[in-house]
Image (spheres, rainbow, N blue to C red):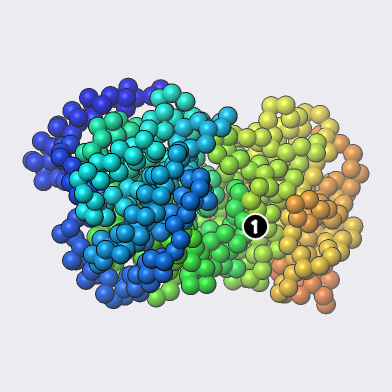
């Protein structure tokens, strides 16, 4: 239920009076509403500028400050955009305004302020910033971005406006950006207003709330918008940052929402004199680590949930957007404690930012602390589980395996891809995700039941996760992922990594009535995929993946084509069955020629999986025991799996200090 205090402008004023009195006692930085000033000083004050200039003279900040000034100079002659204020305009406008306005704030070169002013005034001259549709009638993503641009101009270049111009600017900003935000919440009841997960909450409430904060002293009704935005951003940042800092929407959309939420939170911390516990929450969750761990040895991300493989690939300067987000990591590092955080410092200095910042965001420069960054990325843990968001990452000298046990969202981008995974071998992505817009289960590396896929709004559950002597093991339950209408009564996907390059998947499947089961593996092949009986070979440019399968009653392995090429694994008969176990071995090798493929056998009576072959890495004996919950790994090559954990404990190592 919506908090009644959020709707009360009187509560806002009372809060400011009460907290200002407390701030006098505590020495905090909180103020009551006051007469309009040339600068709201949302992120830094005039007194901070001298120190900022000194910090920008050397090191990575010095390099990026020079780059920002070069970008600002280039933008002086860039054409001012016209037309509808949609995402195609609001994003470039935000970059142009933020870069040139920040350059003015630190250099006092009026040319930069004039260029920023031309951009925002052109947007404010548009008839409207919204285009109402059936699903959203009020403020939208473009509104949040345009509001952010105007807030930055007003904050950093406000002294270039006369008092009358400031009044007009603030009122116009309220009408174009903040009034639609109030309408979305109070009248339109748009879909995102109570959604604490979607990036829309971060972008719209963050951007519109920042604008409301900027003109708080100028337009009384803006204070009501700030009352709405603040608790929403607090909930969004807490909720969208899952345990261990993972995100539900995938790296791309997580980063998008988090950025605007963080812009707001950073300003609100100064404005209100409290961080609402967000900094402690981020410290406890090790926020930011996920953004580094999810980038593989092929320099591309594990692109679950509507993200292409080339999004954020590599690092700057090869890709200005590449790698972990510099602004977010700089912010979280600055809040990590007096000893700093080496991984976040590295990520802040080496990571990129959204394209419209042209390689360097002002926020990186504002947020980056004095913690020295290592010259190279600190060694990451070889095996980690990001709880709640559900990504498991296993790294060996030659492979990188990322498993998705998360959530098929019904509140955001809803890829039905539980149980899917990405496998990089020899630096090459051989099992991949087809990427943006490929929502259906059939286009992911998981299981179809009766030819049908998963539904929205279901969560995978880790039953086991951990490392034994010479192996790693996970078991994740997806039984509910196919909905109440599905006859499925059990689907637990087990993954066992043996040695460096042998991965064994065991799909334990059962249904109330006989149905066909099919496991699909989306492959990235450099040519045709030869299949023979129970096996296939996926040849890449630098490495190959041998896929061999087994099942009681026989198995068939075929090639198919959907959003990408895939290898299909099914019971040999193709007839419906009420229960089956599909065992699939994925063996990565430098070259698939010159060796005998492994043989794979599974004995349901003993629970033994045996892998044999000419490749030395392909020898493995896995023992599974049957329980009321289905199969569970007992041992690998004689080594007990009894001490493998449940996946409930943190596995990340902190890089602080």
Q: Position of residue 103 (x, y in %)?
A: 30, 64
Q: Label 1: which residue? A: 422
Q: Position of residue 574 (x, y in %)?
A: 89, 43
Residue 644 in view: no
Q: Position of residue 404 (x, y in %)?
A: 60, 49
**306 up-or-down from 223: above or below:** below
Quarter the N terminus occupies:
top left
Q: Residue at x 76, y 72 (%)?
A: 615
Residue 578 placement, left or right of 346? right
Residue 232 placement, left or right of 545? left
Q: Residue at x 70, y 59 (%)?
A: 431
Place residue 310 in its image quadrant: bottom right
Q: Residue at x 75, y 45 (%)?
A: 442
Q: Position of residue 106 (x, y in %)?
A: 25, 64
Quarter the C terminus occupies:
bottom left
Number of numbered callouts drawn: 1
């Amino acid at each position: 239920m919506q908090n009644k205090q959020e709707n009360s402008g009187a509560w806002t004023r009372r809060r400011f009076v009460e907290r200002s009195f407390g701030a006098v006692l505590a020495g905090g930085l909180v103020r009551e509403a006051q007469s309009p000033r040339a600068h709201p000083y949302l992120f830094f004050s005039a007194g901070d500028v001298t120190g900022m200039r000194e910090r920008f003279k050397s090191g990575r900040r010095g390099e990026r400050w020079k780059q920002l000034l070069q970008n600002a100079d280039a933008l002086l002659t860039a054409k001012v955009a016209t037309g509808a204020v949609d995402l195609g305009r609001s994003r470039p406008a935000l970059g142009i305004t933020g870069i040139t306005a920040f350059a003015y704030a630190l250099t006092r070169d009026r040319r930069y302020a004039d260029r920023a002013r031309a951009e925002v005034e052109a947007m404010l001259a548009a008839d409207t910033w919204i285009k109402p549709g059936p699903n959203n009638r009020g403020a939208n993503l473009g509104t949040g971005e345009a509001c952010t641009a105007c807030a930055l101009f007003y904050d950093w270049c406000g002294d270039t406006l006369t008092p009358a111009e400031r009044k007009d600017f603030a009122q116009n900003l309220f009408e174009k950006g903040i009034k639609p935000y109030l309408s979305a919440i109070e009248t339109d009841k748009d879909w995102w207003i109570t959604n604490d997960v979607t990036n829309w909450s971060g972008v719209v409430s963050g951007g519109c709330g920042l604008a409301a904060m900027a003109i708080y002293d100028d337009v009384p009704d803006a204070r009501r918008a700030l009352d709405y935005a603040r608790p929403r951003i607090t909930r969004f940042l807490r909720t969208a940052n899952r345990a261990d800092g993972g995100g539900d929407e995938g790296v791309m959309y997580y980063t998008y929402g988090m950025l605007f939420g963080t812009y707001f939170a950073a300003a609100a911390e100064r404005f209100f004199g409290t961080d609402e516990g967000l900094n402690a929450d981020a410290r406890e969750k090790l926020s930011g680590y996920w953004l580094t761990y999810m980038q593989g040895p092929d320099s591309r991300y594990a692109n679950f949930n509507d993200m292409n493989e080339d999004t954020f690939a590599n690092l700057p300067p090869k890709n200005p957007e590449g790698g972990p987000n510099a602004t977010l990591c700089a912010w979280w590092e600055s809040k990590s404690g007096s000893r700093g955080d080496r991984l976040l410092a590295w990520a802040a200095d080496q990571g990129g930012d959204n394209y419209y910042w042209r390689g360097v965001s002002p926020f990186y420069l504002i947020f980056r602390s004095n913690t020295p960054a290592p010259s190279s990325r600190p060694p990451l843990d070889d095996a980690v589980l990001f709880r709640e968001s559900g990504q498991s990452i296993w790294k060996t000298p030659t492979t990188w395996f990322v498993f998705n046990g998360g959530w098929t969202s019904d509140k955001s981008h809803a890829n039905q891809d539980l149980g899917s995974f990405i496998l990089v071998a020899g630096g090459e992505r051989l099992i991949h995700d087809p990427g943006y817009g490929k929502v259906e289960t059939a286009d992911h590396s998981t299981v179809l039941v009766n030819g049908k896929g998963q539904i929205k709004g279901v969560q995978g559950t880790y039953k086991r996760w951990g490392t034994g002597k010479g192996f790693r093991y996970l078991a994740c339950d997806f039984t509910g992922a196919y909905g109440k209408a599905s006859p499925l009564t059990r689907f637990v996907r087990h993954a066992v990594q043996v040695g460096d390059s042998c991965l064994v998947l065991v799909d334990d499947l059962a249904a109330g009535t006989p149905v066909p089961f099919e496991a699909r593996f989306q492959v990235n092949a450099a040519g045709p995929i030869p299949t023979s009986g129970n096996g296939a070979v996926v040849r890449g440019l630098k490495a190959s993946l041998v896929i061999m399968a087994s099942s009681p009653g026989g198995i068939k392995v075929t090639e198919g084509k959907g959003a990408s090429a895939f290898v299909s694994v099914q019971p040999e008969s193709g007839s419906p069955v009420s229960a089956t176990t599909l065992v699939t071995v994925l063996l990565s090798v430098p070259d698939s020629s010159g060796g005998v493929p492994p043989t794979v056998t599974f004995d349901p009576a003993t629970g033994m999986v045996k892998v044999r072959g000419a490749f030395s890495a392909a020898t493995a004996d896995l023992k599974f025991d049957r329980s009321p919950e289905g199969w569970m790994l007992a041992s690998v090559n004689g080594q007990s799996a009894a001490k493998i954990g449940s996946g409930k404990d943190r596995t990340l190592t902190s890089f602080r200090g």
